[in-house]
Amino acid sequence: MGALAGMLITAIVQSSSITTGLSIPLVQQSLMPATATIPIVIGANIGTTVTALVASTKMHKTARSVAVANLCFNAFGVLLFLPFLGSFAEIAVEWAANPGMAAAWAQLIFNLVMVLAVLLLLRIFCGRLESLSTSASHAAAA
């Protein structure tokens, strides 16, 4: 539920920085538990793609493709974390020096995991693309 709230709030204000920047002081003032803030901050990753999607509507197809790819990348990441987001939030809170830092660390860890996942998948994708390209050029030559 928190990830959905983070996505919607960020889509409305079109800034994940605002969502994160408002969530962390709420935790620091003990108005919201850090375990509730972390899903909001993670969900903000999807909401922040709305700006690019809106901006790309009147642009070239390439711009729209990049905006959709950004949405897919962020949605994939949140969906990847969603099954264990509660446990992830609890671990982040336990490891952090203070509850406000827990949200920042969780965001950093989320982004690092996503970069690693994309780099791994990109390598597989590029390998398959190269083999398809080689097969196509051999078929055309024959």
Image (spheres, rainbow, N blue to C red):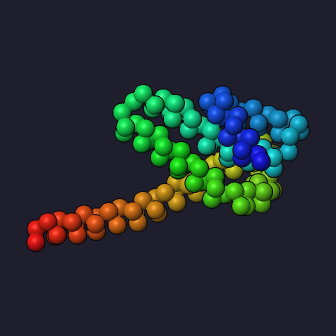
| Residue 83 can be seen in this image | yes
Please tell me which residue is depicted at 69% across the width and 37% down the height of the picture. 8
Residue 31: x and y in percent read 88, 36
> For residue 101, what is the image quadrant?
top right
**Going by the image, does 83 lie left or right of 49?**
right
Please tell me which residue is depicted at 47% across the width and 40% down the height of the picture. 67
Please tell me which residue is depicted at 78% across the width and 57% down the height of the picture. 86
Nearest the eye: 103 or 125: 125
Residue 93: x and y in percent read 79, 52
**Going by the image, does 54 lie left or right of 100?**
left
Q: How many marks?
A: 0
- Vertical placement of residue 118 versus 45, above or below: below
- Vertical placement of residue 6 versus 55, above or below: below
Residue 3: x and y in percent read 72, 46
| Residue 105 can be seen in this image | no
- Vertical placement of residue 96 versus 32, above or below: below
**Going by the image, does 1 lie left or right of 69?**
right
Which quadrant of the rendered structure holds the C terminus? bottom left
**Going by the image, does 70 lie left or right of 128?**
right
Q: Residue furthest left?
A: 142
Please tell me which residue is depicted at 45% across the width and 32% down the height of the picture. 56
Nearest the eye: 33 or 69: 69
Nearest the eye: 87 or 94: 87
